[in-house]
Amino acid sequence: MHTCFVLHDQLPDITLKTTPEELATAHAGWSTLADKEWSESCLDDLAVFRSELPHFSSDIHICGECSSTLDVARALTERNLLCEWDSILGLRQKSGRGQLRRAWNSPEGNIYAALRLPMTGFFANELGALVMGFLLADALQQLGYNARIKWPNDILVDSKKIGGILLEERGGVLTAGIGINLHSHPPQEDLRTEWAVPAGCLCKNEQTLPILQVWQTLVDHMHFCYNAQVVQYTTEKLISSVEKQLAWLGREVWIHGSDLVNRSGKLMGISQDGGLRIRQQDGEKVIHSGSISLRP
Amino acid sequence: MAIKTFNEIMEEVKGKPILVANRGIPARRICRSIRERFDAVAVMTATDIDKTSPAASAAQELLLLGSDPRAYLDIDRIISLAKKRGVVAIHPGWGFASEDHKFPTRCAEEGIIFIGSTAESMNLLGNKVQVRALAQKLGVPVVPGSDGSVDIPTARKFCEEIGFPIMLKAEGGGGGRGIFLIKNQDELESAFVKASTMAQASFGNPRLYIEKFLASARHIEIQVISDKYGNVFAFDERDCSIQRNHQKLVEITPSPSELITPELRARLKEYSRSLVTAVGYDSLATVEFLVTPDGEPYLIEVNTRLQVEHGITEVRYGVDLVEEQIAVAFGAELRLKEEKFPPSQMAMQLRINCEDPQDDFAPNCGVVSRYISPGGPGIRIDSNLSAGYDFPSNYDSAGALLISYGRGWKKVLGTMERALNEYSIGGLKTTIPFFKQVIRHPKFRQGDFDTNFIGNTPELLCYTDLAPEAERISKLIAEISAKGTNPYVQLGEYRSKDTPRVGEFNPVMPAINNATLKAAPAYPQGDRKALLDFVRDTDYVHFCDTTPRDITQSNSGNRFRLAEDKLIGPYLDNCGFFSIENGGGAHFHVAMLANMTYPFTEAKEWNQFAPKTLKQILIRSTNVLGYKPQPQNLMRATGEMICDHYDVIRCFDFLNHVENMRPFAEVALNRKEVVFEPAISLSWAKGFDVKHYLQVTEAILAMVADVAGVSTKKASEMIILGLKDMAGVCPPRFMTELITAIRKQWPSLVTHYHRHYTDGLFVPTVGAAAKAGAHIVDTGMGAAVRWYGQGEVLSTAAYIEEELGLKTNLNKDMIRECNFVLKQVMPYYDKYTAPFFQGIDHDVVHHAMPGGATSSSQEGALKQGYIHLLPYMLKFLAGTRQVVRYHDVTPGSQITWNTAFLAVTNAYKRGGEEEVRYLLEVLEHVTKYEEKDLSEEMKEARLAIYQDSNDAFRDLLLGKFGKLPLGFPADWVYQSAFGAEWKQAINQRTEVSPLSTLEDINLAAEESDFINQIRRKPTDEEFVMFLNHPADALKTVRFKRDFGNPNNIPLDVWFEGLETGRELHFVDDNAKPHSMTILHVSEPAKDGKCVVRYVLDSDIMSYDVQVATPQEEESAGSEKADPNNPLHVAAPSNGDLWVMYVNPGDVVKKGEELFNVSIMKQEKAVLCPADAMVKRVLKTADYKETKMMVPVKEGDLLIELGPIPRRCSNEACQKPLSIEGMAYCHFCGEKLEA
């Protein structure tokens, strides 16, 4: 039996305090919080509200407005309150971050999560980001979405970017920051560059998705898939599973931000060390950094 | 003092050490004079870098100065070392400390003779401001300007008086440095500050003076030498007008310009003499003037030292200035008397610097891989170069001084040009090719130049720095040999170094007897009418041989080279063929893509080694030789060039849209010596019946008639009608029917039948065609016939003669000889260029994939993992051809294939094989049943058929390629291909030729583009190549520049490289023979390069070849952390450092984040291991600001920590004290405990 906590105390510079009622009224997606039974409690020195999470294998901590759920995760980890596969969900983030401290637009209504991962197996080497992408894409597919991985760590559904993953390792602890556009997505003008993949969100029309439940389902799938299958995979099997979900396989892509900058090539697959295999006129190359797009 | 003679000086100096405090060219020059007559000991200063330089060889002893490259400026040290050695005199050379007045002063103090000016004279004559005052006193005209150094307000006043533009010059400067050109008052102030700061830094003297800027002036200088007894010799002027950024590049004596009249010369010499006499000067000096276009001289400065260009004066007069200067320094009387030493030679010097003129004269350094210096009459060289010398980066870029001399300007020019062609410096960029351009320039040759010449003549920088061709070819051979494959032939890694070779190519070539060679051509040449009449009147079947083009295009990947064409060409020329098809189609492009051959040069050579037979080319109607429709002006240019080299021009259109052929017809029909052969693309399917093709023929004749302004009957006599069965699908009975009908309707029309072998029915079908009246048929040489080209000539001829009773007129013996030679060539092509899938495929009659495309398309499917879907794709082809009907030749065949590929693979991705099968069922259904018999379900399902098609297919449906031969397909096809926009698509579609809407190409802009890329103008041929295939044309031009003509390499070496130890003989483009033997190929080093050492003619050369990717990146030099040292913070693994948070001096706490490394998209924070102070930060990054990451390797030391220093005890201060043993805090002044 595991628990859902709502952080009632504030963590200075990291998160403001909040209550389940406040959260439930902040956005339609959070309204299901009102249906749960909450009791006041303490976690270490932090005041919290708690509720049961039946049939779920880890804890979820929800906080109000925060700098970034990754910061909240770090604070809780330092207090030994966050175990592997526990996660943080934030209402909104003031300084949500993506790769290399780029901004991640975070208004309420979407999933901003920080998931603590194990530091073993594939997560101990450089394939961690790929595994995470694979698990998430797989979990979304189980929910019926046509999800694909745009190498290395963006999630596309119906060719639009609906999510991103950032892995941060600090002091022996690996945390995945996961942002998923449920109800809204940034307008095209806000996107980084002209060649960025257009953004989308999972919601169709005016439907409302229950944020907590969606996240729970995803974590459930990912955790199960990892423990039951991925953890036993050989590297070859992992790579080939990832390739099956790779967006734009076989297509001509343009490469940005690595030493193949502004070149194009055919996307051939993933190499055994997680790099992207690109075929150009003079042979196949493997890139390990940079990003790809369909347009130059 | 008693006047000493030269001989007395020689006695005095013999055996004594004389030091040259310099390096490189000047040091070598001076040491030579020290040793010659004086027989003194030549000692040269040398820093560690220069100890083994070529110039150092001229000295008998070296005065070692240690590791600091700037040691040549340390006068005190040099003098003290000299004293220790017992040196009696020091020559400062030029540059370095040669004009530092401390030098002579210190030498005098130490009792060493300074071979040069006294300190007083340096200060008087050498100081720009002082000399102006002196000159004015003596009545020597000076450049208008300030008489002394100025400050900003004075400068402004002067500028107003003398007017802009002005030159701001450093008082202590010289050698053209420290000069700023100012055009207006606004620039003055900032330039002044900049100039003053620079002057202080460079010359130790920040004072500036002003001179008026004299436009279009010539730089004329007078060399003088004087002794201690008042004797002066003024030499003829040196013209140093050719300068760049005030640096001299070319010096000439006497000036080739008429501006320097004997009167002016005398005047300048008189001024110079008066200047040196006035100060009692007793050494060498040069007085520099600017002479305006109206002949007025103005003094600029006096140089109180030996100059770089002294050599030309020496050569002009036949004297040794350095020797004289040394003698004079020791007190000898000047031996040179103006009356006794008249000038005789004219001389010119070029400064051969190690700089890249095309890169703004950026200095080059590195190993001189090859050094061949010129020689012969009229040449003098002073250099600091040799083969193997690692030209250093620490000093100036002077490599050599090249002087040519002779009687008269023309001789001097000719000698210099010859010398520049002989001079070969490999491994570095030098100014040699630039000077070749200068020497050639008409203005230079006329002597009509001023100091702006180089700046105003940008075309001097347009050249290609070419090594001799044999050297370039040898590099190519070295590369292929080291790699084991030839990367330029674009066949991937078709073999490796260890793959067994086919072996040395040494074909046996039977001689062609003289009678045959001398026999007249079998067909009339150069006259279309005569040729066509001849074909009509003869009663035998004519043959066109396609071996050099279509056969090898289809079966040998289009890689058959001109080199091998040359072997079989002479035989083909005597076989009695109507024509040889030797160009066009994809061959034009691939010649540039993979054979690195200029296609029109290839055509020209064909006409040289096979002159008797007509040459035939294949072109596409709209694209001609390119890949997209060509605008009129481009088509005209390409068309004319085609007509220059080819006699029969076969033109086809995959839609048989005759209007598409019109523009080319206009070019070809205009040339009476050329035969235009419009060709009908043939398919065998519903709708494409004889009646249809007769209509096409009529349309063609109508168009030709219109263009030529004649009747259709006349038109039918002027052309050849081609019948092109690209896939080989039309059966014998159809060809019989078709040709009989054509011959009946147009009896005078010459017909030419072309067919591919793919369905296996070549011989009977060609026979049927010939029997029905086809005049000319295409066949190929048996040794090269395979699956996808044409069939074989002798068997076809035998069938025609023996089974069908027709006649031929072939020289079968010659065909046999040709086959014998070709048979020896083919094994190489078969091994390396044969298509992946081979074999006869009779199903081509259903799927209609043409010739060469068959194998490559199917291979593509295999490589992408869809081989299991291939049968479905072929079925799709068979079906779609019945829906959207056109002919499967380029580009139609590509479009059909892509449509099939996309439809099948996407269906597979959607729903596996079941989905594919369903798709094909629907397609079959749709083709079998009429529209009215289709169910609603079927009508819906069929929309899936073209939903995945690409833009090319849609363009085809819109009519953008031309008019579809049987009209537009049904509306549902548009619905399927365009989706929601299908109605607009139908509205947009057109039947007009795409050529009508093309705008002319901007030829001037294209030429500009070429010049930018290649830095010279293109030849006409290169330009047409570039307009048709820009990227590959540039590739070939660059290849030729880097490697020469690859057709000079024998076939086996082209594919396999040269084995170590085998001696290869080859010829270059000038028919000069060469030999090359590879001595050794090293194993690849860590950087992935291996070194090939080889002998080329009589030179040993080496060449680095990149054979593997480097194992370690350039950061092999990164310092590694000591894993046992807790103060070392290293990169945790290979990745990119993207932010470094600390700087040296920061005090950090345990657990604080120091930096962050991105490892395969995972961001790892590296934390501080303990409270400490940051001592060193080895790499830094700030991605947010700079958008750059720094690659790091696991274990690289990134931060070195140190113990936290003690802090100031003052509570208010508490700053960390980074220096040990301080008594007082240097922040707050508090006294510290010990």
Image (cartoon, rainbow, N blue to C red):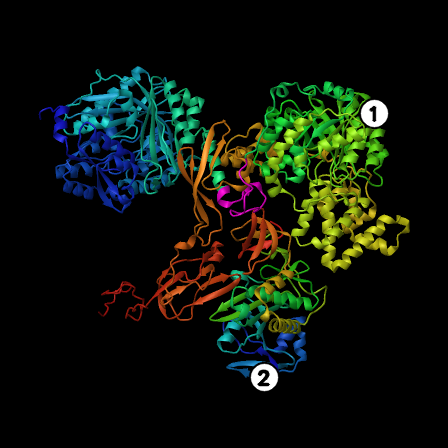
Of residue B331 and residue B1042, the one placed in the foreground of this image is B1042
Q: Which residue type does callout 1 highlight?
A: Trp
Whether residue B2 sits left or right of residue B304 in the image: it is left
Residue B640 occupies quadrant: top right
Residue B627 visible (yes or no): no
Whether residue A206 sits left or right of residue B518 in the image: it is right
Which residue was labeled with disc 1? B746
Q: How many marks?
A: 2
Of residue B1037 and residue B838, the one placed in the foreground of this image is B838
The segment highlighted magenta reads B480-505
Q: Which residue occupies 49% across, 50% down?
A: B1108
Checking the image for residue B494, the label placed there is none
- Crowd rating for badge 1 (residues with CA inside 10 Å; few <14, some 14–19, many 20+): some
Measured from the top left, where is residue B203 in percent x and y? 27, 40
Measured from the top left, where is residue B589 in percent x and y? 62, 36
The correct choice, above or below, for B576 with respect to B1001 in the image is above
- Our reading of the magenta stretch's main secondary structure is loop
Helix, strand or loop status at disc 2: strand
Helix, strand or loop status at disc 1: loop
Q: Quadrant of the C terminus of chain B?
A: bottom left
Q: Which residue type does callout 2 highlight?
A: Glu
Measured from the top left, where is residue B482 in percent x and y? 48, 44
Checking the image for residue A40, the label placed there is 2
The answer for how far apart the CA atoms under marks 2 and 1 are is 103 Å
Whether residue B1162 sits left or right of residue B865 in the image: it is left
Q: Quadrant of the N terminus of chain B?
A: top left
Check the image and name the residue furthest to the right. B932
* Chain of the residue on which disc 1 is drawn: B
Contact (Cβ within 8 Å) of mark 2 with mark 1: no
Measured from the top left, where is residue B412 in percent x and y? 36, 21
* Chain of the residue on which disc 2 is drawn: A
Can residue B495 be found in the magenta stretch? Answer: yes
